[in-house]
Image: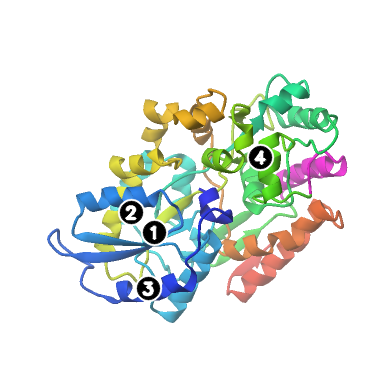
Amino acid sequence: MRSISGKKVFALTGAAAMLLSVAACGSSNAKNAGPSDNTEITVWAWEPTLKQADAAFQKKYPNIKVKLENVGTAAKTVTSLNNAIQAGKGGPDVAQIEYNTLPQFVIGEAKVANLKDKASSYKNFYTPGTWSSVNVSGGIYGLPMDSGPQALFYNKATFDKAGIAQPPKTWDEYYQDAQKIRALGGNYYITSDTGDMPTFNAYMWQIGARPYKTSGDKVSITLKSDPKVKKLTDYWQKMIDEGLIDTKTASWSDEWNRGLGDGTIASINIGAWMPANLLGSSAQAKGNMRVAPSPQWDASASPTTGENGGSSLAVMSASKKQDAAWKYINFISHEKAGIKARTDAGAFPADQATLKDPDFLKGTDELRAYFGGQEYNKVLAQAATTVKPGFQFLPYAGEANSIYPDHIGKAYTTKAVTLQQGLGTFQDALVKYGKTQGFTVTD
């Protein structure tokens, strides 16, 4: 869940949380704890619905106490994990790790436990996209806890004002609708984009590009040469050049939330975890917001979309309480009571059964009102079934996320480079960094 994965919403606990966790991970009494043994596990996670799920877990396992600690955003959690791993102490037993950064804890000497002996039968339980994301280098290195299939959230009032009767079914229609919305004048745009890597990854995933490939310590990066990446960048370059998108309003800023609320930012393509964020941050759009499948590149082909965000729960290899840690992640991510506790609190699931559950598909009364009576979860659940497996992330995705704006942002904000030029220097930087980390990198 990207909203709750690290952009803006929840308070950070910072270094103090790391210090508190040292004692918890330092005890050694529970790697093979039996049902009557008392133990405590430390969990690092930023996702707030875990509070409700933890309460349900401790009803089932009263002898396993959970110390839930928020050490910051998704990126800060990665940094804190790396610091604890390098120090050889102070880390958690369980960590929430985004799908895109999970490989960097697996390649080489795995820092998270391989769960293949426990979870190999779980394949059909989860959606294909999320299951493929925890399957890295032949192992299973976490359980999917949520998902973020990308969908189109749009303001129907603005679309109506522009004379758009239906949301765009194809990217060609999206371009035409962008022209109609811009013709309204003022600050009206079909969307806002200043360069966001998770969204761009989801676009590449949808169009069928596979620019990153990893096998052991060998990495291939083909952002420059992949023809589907070029098709994607050519499309967005046209949108930028013709002034059809807002390239000044940054995602998650107050201005962005206001634009979504008043409809001047008429739509966003973003993950299925977005509804509660819209309700909380762009309340003015109540009754006007709708959700539709992402526009398609080929109207005659089966619908596809990409994942935008989403996280796993992983057991750390250094944990001395792996049995208790496994019980925890299995309850949260695989058992019905744990999943329901989180989805009731607003999480978007990764398992196939919940995505078909009538109660889940109805959504909440409050959010249905926000979406003008639309059963929004039906659209989002359908989107989850169209995510195709096979998209790989770099084994140093954290670094990629960090430097992406330095190379791509200028294509949006100052127009100093084109998107393709920005991707070129981005690829060069990724190749150079990978080699310094001991990878054999080709492009």
The local crowd at label 2, few if under 14, some if 14 to 19, many if 20 or more residues have their Cα within 10 Å, is many
Q: CA distance from mark 2 to mark 4?
A: 33 Å
Q: Secondary structure at mark 3?
A: helix
Q: CA distance from mark 1 to mark 2?
A: 7 Å
Q: N-terminal of the two: label 2 or label 4?
A: 4
Q: Position of residue 408 (x, y in %)?
A: 75, 56
Q: Which mark is residue 63?
A: none
Q: Quadrant of the C terminus?
A: bottom right
Residue 411 or residue 216, whichever sits in front: 411
The residue singled out by tag 4 in the image is 207
The residue singled out by tag 2 in the image is 329
Q: Which residues are magenta?
A: 226-247
Q: Position of residue 52 (x, y in %)?
A: 34, 48
The mark closer to the camera, 2 or 4, is: 2
**Contact between labelled residues 4 and 2, with CB atoms less than 8 Å apart:** no
Q: N-terminal of the two: label 3 or label 2?
A: 3
Q: Which mark is residue 20?
A: 3
**Contact between labelled residues 1 and 4, with CB atoms less than 8 Å apart:** no
Residue name at image x 78 percent, y 24 percent: 162
